[in-house]
Image (cartoon, grey):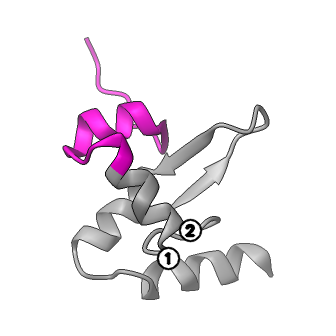
């Protein structure tokens, strides 16, 4: 069976993958630690989808710089 890289995952799956509880994830979103359009997006059905690449950048200490630059380029 092959490996499939997934960019966006639900809060439930994100919790399973990262070890953060669903409440901790929602608190980071609510507290502004994770920013909409960078660390997560709302899908067409309005469910929050977490960005795994932005999470990796955040963990590796590139909290906003790389993600903000990427978002700025995409917005241009």
- The residue lying toward the viewer, choosing from 51 and 30, is 30
Q: CA distance from mark 2 to mark 1?
A: 6 Å
SS class, disc 2: loop
Identify residue for label 1.
Answer: 67
Q: Which quadrant of the figure contains the C terminus? A: bottom right
| Precedes in sequence: disc 2 or disc 1 | 2
* Residue 56 belongs to magenta span: no
**Residue pictured at 47% horizontal, 72% vertical:** 31
Local packing at callout 2 (Cα closer than 10 Å; few below 14, some 14-19, many 20+) is: many
Q: Is residue 18 left or right of 67 when viewed as pictured?
A: left
- Which residue in the protein does label 2 denote? 38
Pointer 2 with pointer 1, Cβ within 8 A:
yes
Residue 74: x, y in percent?
Answer: 71, 73
In reply to whether residue 17 is colored magenta, the answer given is yes
Residue at point 36% right, 80% down?
63
**Residue at figure coordinates x 49%, y 49% from the top left:** 50
The image shows residue 35 at horizontal and vertical percentages of 55, 70
* Nearest to the observer: residue 66 or residue 14: 14
Magenta residues, start to end: 1-23
Against 62, residue 29 (above or below) is: above
| Residue 48 appears left or right of 29 | right
Q: Residue at x 56, y 43 (%)?
A: 49
Residue 61 position within the rendered picture, expressed as x and y whole percent measured from the top left: 24, 81
Judge the density around disc 1: few (<14), some (14-19), many (≥20) Cα neighbours within 10 Å: many
């Amino acid at each position: 069976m092959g490996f499939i890289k997934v960019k966006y995952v639900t809060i439930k799956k994100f919790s399973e993958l990262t070890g953060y509880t669903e409440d901790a994830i929602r608190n980071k979103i609510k507290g502004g630690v994770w920013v909409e359009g960078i660390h997560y997006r709302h899908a067409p059905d309005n469910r929050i989808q977490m960005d795994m690449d932005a999470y990796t950048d955040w963990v590796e200490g590139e909290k906003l710089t790389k993600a903000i630059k990427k978002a700025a380029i995409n917005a241009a």
